[in-house]
Image: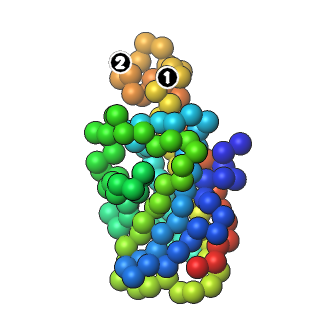
Amino acid sequence: MFADRLITDGSLKRTDDGFSVEIRLNWYRSLPLSCIREVTLTVDGARVEPESSSIVVDGVEYHWADLPEHIDTFWFVGDPAELRVRRAEPLEPGLHEVELTLSSRIPYVVVAVGNDNPAEACLFETNTCAKSLAA
């Protein structure tokens, strides 16, 4: 249901210091940024290291390691986020194979009653999307 829309069509853009792509939340309701657990991006078969990427939500840039502390900052379901990648070599113009895996913790859907760690007792929604995008 969510996989085919994780990557926004036509959103791959070359930048001076790398590239960016618009992504969408993999749930039908808005979630706090603290619920984003995994973002794995590959472009033309090469995995992007998390340290070289960040996410921009509502005009503010966040690094992946900082997301758990943003319990009151929401990624609204109707708004795409910008996934920014910084790298030394520019992205070549043309068609690129882009694959994204996004895993989100759904805090209000409990699936493991009695678990000592409430964050682990919740549902995790994980989806993967692959598209050919022109830059």
Residue matched to label 2: 116
Q: x and y percent of residue 35 in the render?
A: 42, 37
State the residue at coordinates (34%, 57%): 61
State the residue at coordinates (46%, 74%): 19
Task: Give the camera-side residue of 3 and 135.
Answer: 135
Query: Does 55 sit left or right of 2 as displayed?
Result: left
Under mark 1, the amino acid is: Tyr
State the residue at coordinates (49%, 82%): 91
Q: x and y percent of residue 79 in the render?
A: 54, 49
Q: Is residue 45 visible?
A: no
Q: Residues within 10 Å of mark 2 (few under 14, many from 20)?
A: few
Asked if 81 appears above or below 51 in the picture, the reply is: above
Query: Does 44 sit left or right of 4 as displayed?
Result: left
Q: x and y percent of residue 97 in the render?
A: 63, 72
First in residue order: circle 1 vs circle 2: 1
Q: How is the image coloured?
A: rainbow
Asked if 17 appears above or below 99 in the picture, the reply is: below
SS for callout 2: loop
State the residue at coordinates (41%, 85%): 89
Tell me how far mark 1 sits from mark 2, CA to CA: 16 Å
Dividing the picture into quadrants, the one containing residue 67 is top left
Q: Residues within 10 Å of mark 1 (few under 14, many from 20)?
A: few
Asked if 94 appears above or below 113 in the picture, the reply is: below
Under mark 2, the amino acid is: Asp
Query: Does 129 sit left or right of 101 as displayed?
Result: right
Residue found at the very far top of the displayed protein: 114
Residue matched to label 1: 108
Task: Give the camera-side residue of 19 and 78.
Answer: 78
Dividing the picture into quadrants, the one containing residue 62 is bottom left
Tally of numbered tags: 2
Task: Give the camera-side residue of 31 and 1.
Answer: 31
